[in-house]
Amino acid sequence: MSEADLWDSEFAGFEVDIDDSAALARAQRIEAARRAAQDYTAKIEEPGWFNDPALAARSKGAARPALFALHEQYFAGRYSEVVDGGLALLDGVGEGKEESELLDLVMRAARRCARETDERVLALARRWTEYPNLPSLSYISAHILLLNSPLSPSPSLAPPPSSTPAPPPLPPSIPPVSPAEVLRASLASLRIHPLLPRPRALLAQILAPLHPALSHAVEAPPKGKDKDKGEGAAPERGEELEREVERVEGLEEGDRDTLRRVLGLVGAEKGEGEEEGVGRNVRSL
């Protein structure tokens, strides 16, 4: 008996049912994608589209086009306009991404046009505690607070134009900026990443007049077996630095822990619990 006869006689009662529904569905999806690609028209936004009131009105977020315009002014060097426009926009923006971005942008523009001592800009700098997961915001806030404090080393990044009057002193209703307030904002910028060079340099500058030993230790990054974790302070220096840390006034225990990590007195793993409670943000990376 041939193989064909064996198949017919033994398996003739079985019907082979081939399910091609998945293949058909895939072919239909491919064909639909091809048709969609043929009908697609690329949307091209013209430069400066956000300055068109009609287009801005159709934007998903009312603040976004205005924020784009402020960024354009910033890169054009019109810093004072950014400060005025940003302060006005902040009055109508609720909490969210736009608000934190505006705070950062306005304070950076204020540094560029010698308006750090404007009481409205100072009020923005004091809001860094609302965004503990944004080290960059804490960093620029520390700059503004420093220039409004007795520790201020220089007027600003750029001298004010001769046509711009000197800012008036803070009204009595606004509390003065204490060294501890400046220090806390600076430490917040290093809480997640204690080895960032620019925040470390600012912290060393703040500490220099009050605690020169700590300032010198911050300027020299810790060296040890695990440099990335901030470990490796010399044992003979550790006790001396620890005593100096305890003498710093106005800090909370979390701030002192951050300072210890910056100095290399403890490892970075000591701060991991704090980080989990605050949350992560792309700006903190």
Image (tube, rainbow, N blue to C red):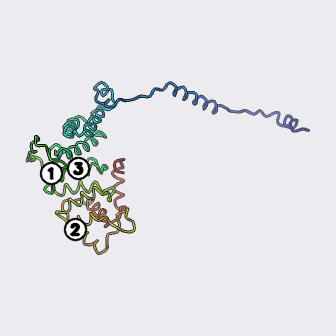
In front here: 124 or 168? 168
Query: From the viewer's perspective, is 9 left or right of 184?
Result: right
196, 128: nearer the viewer = 196
Rendering quarter of residue 274: bottom left
In this view, 228 is above or below 170: below
Q: Which residue, given by chain and number where applicable, does mark 3 sit on? A: 141
Of callouts 3 and 2, the N-terminal one: 3
**Label annotation for residue 155:** 1
Left or right placement of residue 207 versus residue 12 in this view = left
Q: Quadrant of the N terminus?
A: top right
Q: How far apart are the alpha carbons under marks 2 and 1?
A: 26 Å
Q: Which residue is nearer to you in this view: 282 or 113?
A: 113
| CA distance for labels 1 and 3 | 15 Å
Q: Residue beneath label 2, please?
A: 213
The three-letter amino acid code for the residue at tag 2 is Ala
Residue 251: x, y in percent? 22, 59
Q: Is mark 2 on a helix, strand or loop?
A: helix
- Mark closest to the chain's N terminus, 1 or 3: 3
Q: Indicate the quadrant where residue 219 lies.
A: bottom left
Q: Which residue is drawn at 18% across and 51% down?
A: 145
Q: Which of the two marks, 1 or 3, is nearer to us in this view? A: 1
